[in-house]
Image (tube, rainbow, N blue to C red):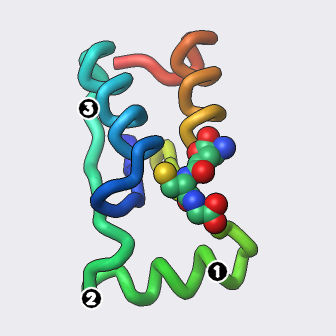
Amino acid sequence: MLRIYGYKGCHYCDMAQELLKAKGIPYNYYDIKSPEQKDKLSELKEQGLTTVPQVYKDDKHVGGYNELYSAVMLGAISK
Ligand SMILES: N[C@@H](CCC(=O)N[C@@H](CS)C(=O)NCC(=O)O)C(=O)O
């Protein structure tokens, strides 16, 4: 399952979700600013990942919107 970490008002986060919806690829979305994601936010900062979205396929880091888009277009991520 895909996981997307983002926040409200993030244009690239919206685009990532729209892409996956258009392709019928299921995902779970998490608001990185919510209290429940405090540890994840710290983890991303420690890794130097300062932009959102951050996308994971199972537990593998895919990257941001650009990397997600490429992976979907290349068929590396599909439904
Ligand atoms: N190349 C990135 C761009 C993502 C991006 O710029 N996201 C904005 C929010 S929509 C962001 O995190 N800005 C904060 C920053 O640049 O520090 C991607 O493809 O995901």
Point 25% across, 24% down: residue:
21
Q: Amino acid at mark 1?
A: Lys
Determine whether the beta carbon of the residue marked 3 sits less than 8 angstroms from the nearest atom of ligand 1. no
Q: Is residue 19 above or below residue 42?
A: above
- Label 2 environment density (alpha carbons within 10 Å; few <14, some 14–19, many ≥20): few
Marks 2 and 1, how far apart at CA: 15 Å
Left of 21 or right of it: where is 79? right
Quadrant position of residue 34: bottom left
| Whole-percent x, y for residue 58 in the image | 46, 48
Instruction: Residue 50: give x, y in percent of width and height.
Output: 64, 69
Of callouts 1 and 3, the N-terminal one: 3
| Contact flag, marks 1 and 3 (Cβ < 8 Å) | no
* Circle 1 SS class: helix
Q: Nearer the viewer, mark 2 or mark 3?
A: 2
- Disc number for residue 45: 1
The amino acid type of the residue labelled 2 equals Pro
Residue 71: x %, y % from top left: 60, 23
Question: From the viewer's perspective, is 65 left or right of 18?
Answer: right
Nearer to me, 37 or 50: 50
Residue drawn at the location 49% of the way across and 43% of the way down: 57
For marks 2 and 3, give the CA distance.
24 Å
Residue shown at 34% from the left, 40% from the top: 14
Q: Are marks 2 and 3 in contact (CB under 8 Å)?
A: no
Q: Mark number for residue 26?
A: 3
Q: Residues within 10 Å of mark 3 (few under 14, many from 20)?
A: some
Q: Which residue is mark 2?
A: 35
